[in-house]
Image (tube, grey):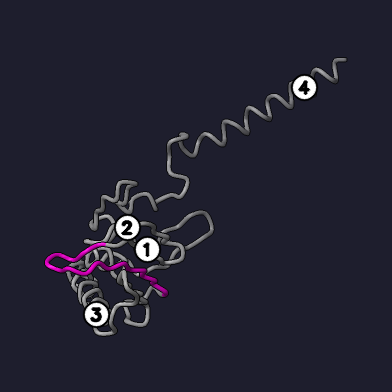
């Protein structure tokens, strides 16, 4: 009987230790995805490009996220008139809903895919749609150029050149 009691005590102490160790990483309200919550994007669609520009490589456990922070921030900045529907910094995808640019009459929707940590035109893939189908090649190219120009401005302002 004494062995059963000591075994139960040992199991109880082990379970309590395990639960205490689990709670040391943060409270129930903490972000399980680490620094991703600091992107400045809340459920209401509010954005902060200042925090997005500081995100170069985000780490979650053993996973490294290599998304060019300047392309990421420039995409959000240039397409700020579009409501963000979802972001995934692990795959480099930003999806937006339909929105009308200031002074424009046509609504657009965009999906941005950043494939590489390099500040390079090949790292940026943009799909731009209107309600009637794909946007013109000229419009898509103009938006890509605006994103790349803004990314270069952010990098120069950061002093990394």
- Residue indicated by mark 4: 8
- Residue indicated by mark 2: 84
Helix, strand or loop at mark 1: strand
CB of mark 2 within 8 Å of CB of mark 3? no
The front one of 14 and 32 is 32
Q: Give the residue at the far top of this rendering.
A: 1
Task: Tell me, yes or no, whether the highlighted magenta stretch contains residue 107.
Answer: yes
Depth-wise, is mark 2 or mark 3 nearer the camera?
A: 3
Helix, strand or loop at mark 2: strand
CB of mark 2 within 8 Å of CB of mark 1? yes
Depth-wise, is mark 1 or mark 4 nearer the camera?
A: 1
Task: State the separation of the CA atoms marked 2 and 3.
Answer: 20 Å
Q: Residue at x 74, y 21 (%)?
A: 9
Density class for disc 3 (Cα within 10 Å; few <14, some 14-19, many ≥20) is few
The front one of 156 and 96 is 96
Where are the magenta residues, as a range? 99-115
Q: Is residue 79 left or right of residue 16?
A: left
Task: Tell me, yes or no, whether the highlighted magenta stretch contains residue 133.
Answer: no
Task: State the separation of the CA atoms marked 4 and 3.
Answer: 70 Å
In the image, residue 1 lies at what x, y percent? 88, 15
The mark nearer the N terminus, 4 or 3, is 4
Residue 147: mark in rendering: none
Depth-wise, is mark 4 or mark 3 nearer the camera?
A: 3
- Residue indicated by mark 3: 139
The mark nearer the N terminus, 2 or 1, is 2
The mark nearer the N terminus, 2 or 3, is 2
- Residue indicated by mark 1: 95
In the image, residue 81 lies at what x, y percent? 21, 61
């Amino acid at each position: 009987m004494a062995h059963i009691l000591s075994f139960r005590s040992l199991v109880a102490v082990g379970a309590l230790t395990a639960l205490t160790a689990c709670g040391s990483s943060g409270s129930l309200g903490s972000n399980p995805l680490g620094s991703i919550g600091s992107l400045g994007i809340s459920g209401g669609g509010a954005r902060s490009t200042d925090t997005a520009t500081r995100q170069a490589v985000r780490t979650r456990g053993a996973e490294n996220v290599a998304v060019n922070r300047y392309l990421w921030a420039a995409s959000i900045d240039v397409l700020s008139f579009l409501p963000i529907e979802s972001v995934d910094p692990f795959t480099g995808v930003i999806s937006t809903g339909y929105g009308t640019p200031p002074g424009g009459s046509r609504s657009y929707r965009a999906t941005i895919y950043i494939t590489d940590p390099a500040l390079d035109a090949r790292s940026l893939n943009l799909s731009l749609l209107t309600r009637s189908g794909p946007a013109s090649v000229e419009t898509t190219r103009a938006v890509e150029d605006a994103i790349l120009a803004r990314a270069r401005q952010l990098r120069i302002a950061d002093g990394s050149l």
